[in-house]
Amino acid sequence: MKLGALAPYEDALVRASPLALVTTEGRLLHLNIAKFLNDPDDADQTVLDRCIAPVLDVGCGPGRLVQALSAQGRPALGVDIANVAVALTCQRGAAALQRDVFDALPGEGRWPTVLVLDGNIGIGGDVASLLNRLRRLLGPRSALFIEASTQVCGTDEVLDVRFLEQGVACGPTFRWARISADVLAVRAEQAGFAVTDQWSAGERDFLRLSRSTTLA
């Protein structure tokens, strides 16, 4: 991500203020900052209940999921490129590193559970590359939980976006992908995963993926 692109997001986390993404064509994509800062909701819990520790949360934000797992005695680590997000996670008493998912990470190839929620499948605007990277983080008997970006079937798009703060576009543009569960399932299989579970909760779609035995 370009230098300075995250500043509006980090400011919104500090102030708990509304924030959105806006495409170069003027299309708005709202970000639920309040949800990120709150405790896990019922939909989040459907994922947490399926986790086997230790858990890696990719794009952990201010750490609601990592903190919830840790509070239950289930070791978890969050990674995020936003310094403020990592600091807020640590303030909650949870563990987090400021790290890009494409950088070297602890426990590569051994994680039992990896989470990619809150639209983070869009990281970098390249779903295929991200799935391939995530596959290398997992252990041989493991699960990758991904939340689809939208419930609109057939969605598979790469957008150039900026943050929108109080109606004003700010910061440099960066690429972001949006993908629905039906398309994500196909892309996951192409990346060497098997879809082992799929469900909806709170108007959100989730997939549980495992490494395909044919490519393990």
Image: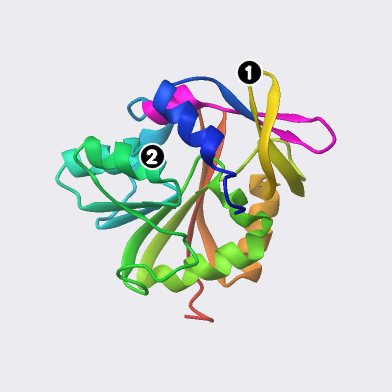
Horizontal arrangement in the rendering, residue 110 relative to residue 186 (left or right): left
Q: Residues within 10 Å of mark 1 (few under 14, many from 20)?
A: few
Q: Relative to residue 6, is residue 104 depicted above or below?
A: below
Q: Residue at x 40, y 71 (%)?
A: 104
Residue 72 coordinates in the image, percent (x, y): 17, 40
Name the outermost residue toward the left. 73
Residue 60 coordinates in the image, percent (x, y): 40, 45
Q: Amino acid at mark 2?
A: Val
Which residue carries the number 2 mark? 84
Q: Residue at x 45, y 51 (%)?
A: 81
Where residue 140 sits, quadrant-wise, is: bottom left
Q: Relative to residue 102, is residue 140 depicted above or below?
A: below
Magenta span:
21-37
Disc 1 secondary structure class: loop
Split into 4 quadrants, where in the image is the N terminus? bottom right
Disc 2 secondary structure class: helix
Q: Amino acid at mark 1?
A: Gln
**Residue 41 shows in this picture:** no
**Residue 58 shows in this picture:** yes
Depth check: give the residue in front, 42 or 71: 71
